[in-house]
Amino acid sequence: MSINQLLILCADAVVLVSALGLLVLSLVLLVECTTAMFGIPSLASSHDGENRKVTVLVPAHNEEVIIHSTLVNLESELKKQHQVVVVADNCSDATAEIARAAGATVIERHAPNDRGKGYALDYGLRFLESDPPDVVVFVDADCRVHQGAIDLLTQQAIATGRPVQATYLMAKSSQPSPKESVSAFAFKVKNLVRPRGLAKLGLPCLLTGTGMAFPWSVIRSVDLASNDIVEDMKLGLDLSIAGHSPVFCPEANVTGILPQQAHAAKSQRTRWEHGHLKTLLTYVPMLLKASVYQKRFDLLISALDLCVPPLSLLVVIWLVLMAVSLLFGVLSAFWIPTTLLATAGLFLLVAILAAWAKFGRTDLPLLELLVIPFYVLWKIPLYLKFLVQPQSMWVRTERDNVNS
């Protein structure tokens, strides 16, 4: 066998393995999106959270623009045995004063060298240790908690003894651009459709950043103090490996707001997606190793779920591999990778259309689906930047002005 033949054989093998990998990830996405179309039973009753002491912990870094409206919203959801604790973390504005005036318990943290939401949450939990609650609920300072969400999260945390993730979605502006609509839909697929599908199969989900409830013994079993840019995802995976896999509560709803300023939207997306990719590379081997040693199928599924990259990147990878496989098919008459990738493309298309038909039709009109290719193109520089300059430091997204 000549050197050229050996090189072609090796290249064919690489393309084949890549095609098989993408086929598996596309199948995972398809299963999640199609099973999400069916209802899931509730894991808690209305009695599970009665008379339980609950603390809502709100990390806040320079949130004077939004903190008052967030706390007013939370106040309507609290019972007499509930309390709100705001961690004013490295603030240089009036966040702490506004939060105290709104009736919250406020603790201030000043540690300029330790920046990040993880450090703020750890500081808040240490403050609670002297008189710990039964359940701690994490809510971001820029989110709106919908009616009944705190009760539902508390009930499910008590009933299961596990972390619980609410449905965390992004609200659009009153006159959204097509790109904003596509972004909100992609966020819904990640934070509602896929976790709902996993819940239907009785499998754990990832934590998505806000609207998270934890029994006290569970949340104190891991260390939160870090500057990880997707500390929520890291926390959920650490808890899963420790035997406390998160469960999804689709009826509890928490809403954030998509940034209206272009640079803020880009900053937020960069942090989320670079963080996801970094966590994927770090935690997939850990999950696979733990699944073997602990003999746990749920950790294997969590690894596969984590392997599915953001939808835009998944489409880009498919396009690149399809182009390469077609080239190799022409050069070497080896068409198996092309067939596998065509099947993967079909899986992707069916998954996206199923998610849109069930969950996205009201948010994303049919004609705006045509914007998706342009949305994917907009994201390509973000992914290329990950290859040369991945974001590693936590950066707070700039807030839009709101009316309190």
Image (tube, helix red, strand yellow):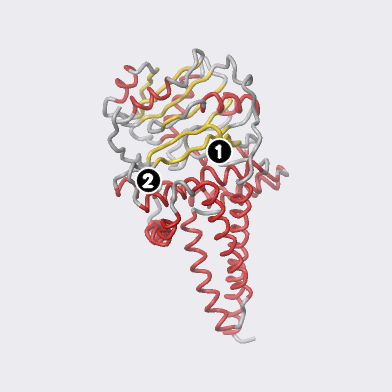
Q: Nearer the viewer, residue 337 or 260?
A: 260
Give the quarter of the figure containing the N terminus: bottom right
Tell me which amino acid carries mark 2: Gln
Tell me which amino acid carries mark 1: Gly
Looking at this rendering, what residue extends furthest in the right direction?
295
Give the quarter of the figure containing the C terminus: top left
Q: Residue at x 49, y 67 (%)?
A: 319
402 lies above or below 281: above
Sequence-first disc among 1 and 2: 1
User: Label 1: how many residues lie within 10 Å, few (<14), some (14-19) or many (20+)?
Assistant: many
Nearer the camera: disc 1 or disc 2: 2
Please give the residue where the numbered disc 1 appears in the rendered image.
236
Q: Please state the horizontal and vertical placement of residue 371, each as a whole percent of the image.
A: 40, 59
351 lies above or below 83: below
* Mark 1: secondary structure: helix
User: Label 2: how many residues lie within 10 Å, few (<14), some (14-19) or many (20+)?
Assistant: some
Please give the residue where the numbered disc 2 appears in the rendered image.
268
Q: Please state the horizontal and vertical placement of residue 12, each as a whole percent of the image.
A: 60, 75
